[in-house]
Image (cartoon, coloured by chain):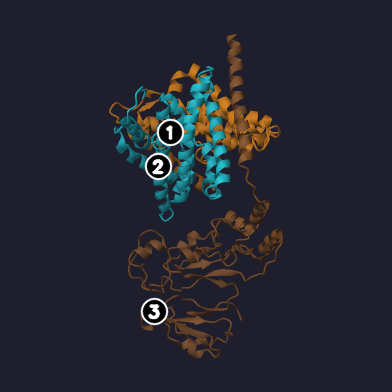
């Protein structure tokens, strides 16, 4: 995915790839812990989705800056892990403070998930992928947004299905996480239909 | 020199980055400082903690905030008793009047063997879903469907499904939050004062010939209880008998006359 | 320091509270890194190293770290050891490094090191934290290995990258792909619950 000139259709393909073909959660395995915890009800799932979209779209470019203008300049790229996680944690803390002040209603609705997003693998993972795939600045923003959208899509589909589990007759040993994982696998299988649509 | 660079640079850069972040967060904490009334956390200690929604607010934190701001009365939390209301009142420096504790009661006695079914329902185990399938599988369109929506949604675990297909209320665990009354598609659970002594345990507004055919224990609306009551405490509203407990003396004449036993004494005399 | 308590803390991570089956944490690497037995054992051992070291260091520093900034401090400690592991595997175990890819640095946001730091290491002495870390890490390695054995033998027909199945064997490729990982882990979790409930 190393390109010098990006056309508009390249960006569209990037979004399709991030959301459908290589869904960050179902195909790339990132973000499973909150996935199984938050997908029990639709409103928590929607709250988490908005949180992840906002945080990831912002931290993707910020970490890109840190990598290219700080770590590379001083030749300490091996400290990438530490620098990125620090940046993400600080950003999430900042956003939590701001939301608490600006919109208490929004804070009560989804503020509880903001600290949880810090340890969400998909945030850090997407930041790493931005570097591994050698994206420029604009593709970084687009890819981060597309990954978050993919996470949200998988989460909302899962929440919709899991709300029905409340009324289904599931054997005791498979309840909760076990059936959740099996369902996630089946949803992932359906996403395989998109393979080959984009790189 | 290279070794010096390799050891000094990481320390300086990461240290510098951390210092900038720490400074940024410190400044942000000042800018975004929010004054949170400490009484809200104190009040929340005395609320139910189950986020049942019985108070009408989104959760216990919301209710606590509303109480402290004066938007909600001190006894807004229906899930706790008068002793907790006293404690909340003390925090805010006001007084509270105690009301009577309410519990849920299932206003139907149409168990699996006593009430007729139209068809065998094998769908999602939820009364609301069953209502979508031809109005439920019971002949009586007012009766309890017995699939346990109320049981599953009780935040305090006070309801359990009985062997006969009717939910049973544990009066000690029930807090009167009203969740069961809201989720039941037929409104069969009703909140009644815990000391209620007499009630008509049926929700059917069907006329006597209809009820006779479809349920052995339902209130037919025949009016025999009304005629028998010496205190005129009973009225028939829409073919369903209603007792006024304030007038009732528990003389027992209505129990004798009722052909199905729908009217029942709840507490010993 | 009681020897029996040390043993108890160590063994609980091996069965009663084994991640990721009983303690449902650390699912991302369990799914991604169990396509082959070598990768599964490798990831498990990396995590064990990080867990043990961070548990010990945090336990040593537990009286010094202020409560309000404890989470960022834990993260920094874990990140340091993760970078060490990353560099060591890149230098000495290159095929493993290429196979595990992005999941080695992602150990830093793995719920297990942070969870144990918060729940255990910050409240207990060094010896118990060491035992806890070692137990949980080895338990995780075992779980990953079992999952990987199943996925590799039936999904690829190999064991430790040597072909062991008969020549006409058609591998069940579904198990090697992401959906297969989810379904496999879900079924194993269900079976573990069944065994667990039978024990009670």
**Residue ID for mark 1:** A144
Q: Is C88 left or right of B41, judged from the image as shown?
A: left
Q: CA distance from mark 2 to mark 3?
A: 48 Å
Residue on which the image places disc 3: B206
Residue B242 at what x, y percent from top left? Answer: 49, 81
Circle 3 chain:
B
Instruction: Please provide percent x and percent y for residue B96.
Output: 68, 67
Q: Which label lies toward us, 2 or 3?
A: 2
Can residue A183 be seen by looking at this rendering? Answer: yes
Measuring 40% from the left and 77% from the top, which residue is drawn there?
Answer: B215
Quarter of the figure that contains the N terminus of chain A: top left
Tag 1, which chain? A
- Would you name the residue on which mark 2 appears? A154
Q: Which mark is residue B102?
A: none
* Disc 1: CA contacts within 10 A as few (<14), some (14-19) or many (>=20): many
**Residue occupying the far front of the picture:** B31
| Whether residue C39 is visible | no
So how many labels did they put on this image? Answer: 3
The x and y percentages for residue A19 are 37, 37
Q: Are marks 2 and 1 in contact (CB under 8 Å)?
A: no
């Amino acid at each position: 995915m190393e390109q010098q000139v990006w056309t508009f259709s390249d960006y569209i393909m990037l979004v399709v790839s991030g959301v459908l073909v290589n869904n960050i959660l179902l195909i790339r395995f990132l973000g499973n812990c909150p996935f199984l915890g938050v997908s029990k009800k639709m409103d928590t799932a929607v709250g988490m989705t908005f949180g992840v979209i906002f945080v990831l779209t912002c931290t993707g470019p910020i970490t890109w800056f840190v990598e290219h203008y700080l770590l590379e300049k001083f030749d300490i790229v091996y400290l990438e892990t530490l620098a990125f996680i620090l940046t993400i944690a600080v950003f999430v803390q900042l956003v939590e403070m701001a939301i608490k002040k600006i919109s208490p209603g929004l804070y009560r609705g989804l503020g509880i998930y903001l600290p949880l997003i810090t340890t969400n693998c998909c945030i850090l993972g997407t930041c790493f992928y931005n570097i591994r795939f050698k994206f420029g600045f604009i593709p970084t923003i687009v890819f981060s947004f597309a990954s978050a959208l993919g996470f949200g899509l998988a989460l909302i589909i899962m929440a919709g299905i899991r709300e029905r589990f409340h009324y289904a007759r599931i054997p005791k040993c498979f309840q909760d996480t076990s059936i959740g994982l099996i369902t996630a696998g089946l949803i992932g299988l359906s996403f395989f239909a998109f393979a080959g649509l984009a790189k | 020199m290279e070794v010096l660079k390799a050891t000094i640079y990481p320390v300086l850069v990461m240290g510098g980055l951390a210092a900038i972040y720490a400074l940024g967060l410190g400044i942000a904490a000042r800018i975004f400082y929010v004054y949170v009334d400490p009484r809200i956390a104190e009040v929340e200690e005395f609320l139910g903690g189950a986020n049942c929604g019985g108070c009408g607010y989104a959760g216990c934190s919301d209710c606590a905030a509303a109480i402290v701001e004066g938007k909600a009365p001190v006894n807004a939390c229906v899930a706790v008793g008068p002793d907790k209301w006293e404690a909340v009142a003390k925090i805010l420096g006001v007084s509270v009047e105690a009301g009577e504790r309410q519990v849920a009661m299932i206003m139907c006695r149409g168990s699996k063997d006593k009430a007729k079914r139209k068809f065998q329902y094998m769908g999602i185990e939820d009364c609301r879903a069953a209502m979508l399938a031809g109005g439920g599988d019971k002949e009586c369109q007012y009766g309890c469907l017995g699939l346990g929506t109320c049981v599953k949604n009780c935040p305090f675990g006070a309801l359990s499904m009985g062997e006969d297909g009717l939910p049973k209320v544990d009066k000690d665990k029930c807090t009167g939050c009203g969740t069961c009354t809201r989720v039941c598609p037929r409104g069969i659970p009703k909140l009644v004062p815990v000391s209620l002594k007499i009630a008509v345990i049926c929700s059917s507004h069907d006329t006597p010939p209809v009820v006779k055919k479809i349920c052995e224990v339902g209130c037919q609306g025949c009016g025999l209880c009304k005629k028998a009551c010496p205190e005129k405490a009973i009225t028939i509203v829409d073919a369903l008998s209603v007792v006024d407990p304030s007038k009732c003396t528990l003389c027992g004449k209505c129990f004798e006359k009722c052909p199905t036993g729908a009217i029942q004494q709840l507490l010993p005399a | 320091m009681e020897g029996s308590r040390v043993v108890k803390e160590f063994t609980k991570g091996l069965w009663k509270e084994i991640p990721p089956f009983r303690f449902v944490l650390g699912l991302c690497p369990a799914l991604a890194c169990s396509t082959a037995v070598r990768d599964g054992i490798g990831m498990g051992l990396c995590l064990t190293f990080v867990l043990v070291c961070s548990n010990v260091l945090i336990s040593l520093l537990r009286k010094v770290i202020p409560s309000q900034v404890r989470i960022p401090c834990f993260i920094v400690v874990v990140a340091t050891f993760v970078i060490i592991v990353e560099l060591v595997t890149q230098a000495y175990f290159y095929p493993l490094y290429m196979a595990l890819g992005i999941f080695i640095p992602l150990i830093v946001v793995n719920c297990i090191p942070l969870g144990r730091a918060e729940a255990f290491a910050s409240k207990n002495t060094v010896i118990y934290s060491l035992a806890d870390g070692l137990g949980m890490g080895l338990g995780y390695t075992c779980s990953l290995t079992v999952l990987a054995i199943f996925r590799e033998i039936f999904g690829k027909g190999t064991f430790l990258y040597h072909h062991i199945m008969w020549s006409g064997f058609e591998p069940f490729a579904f198990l090697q792909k992401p959906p297969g990982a989810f379904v496999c882990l879900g079924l194993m979790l269900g079976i573990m619950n069944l065994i667990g409930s039978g024990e009670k």
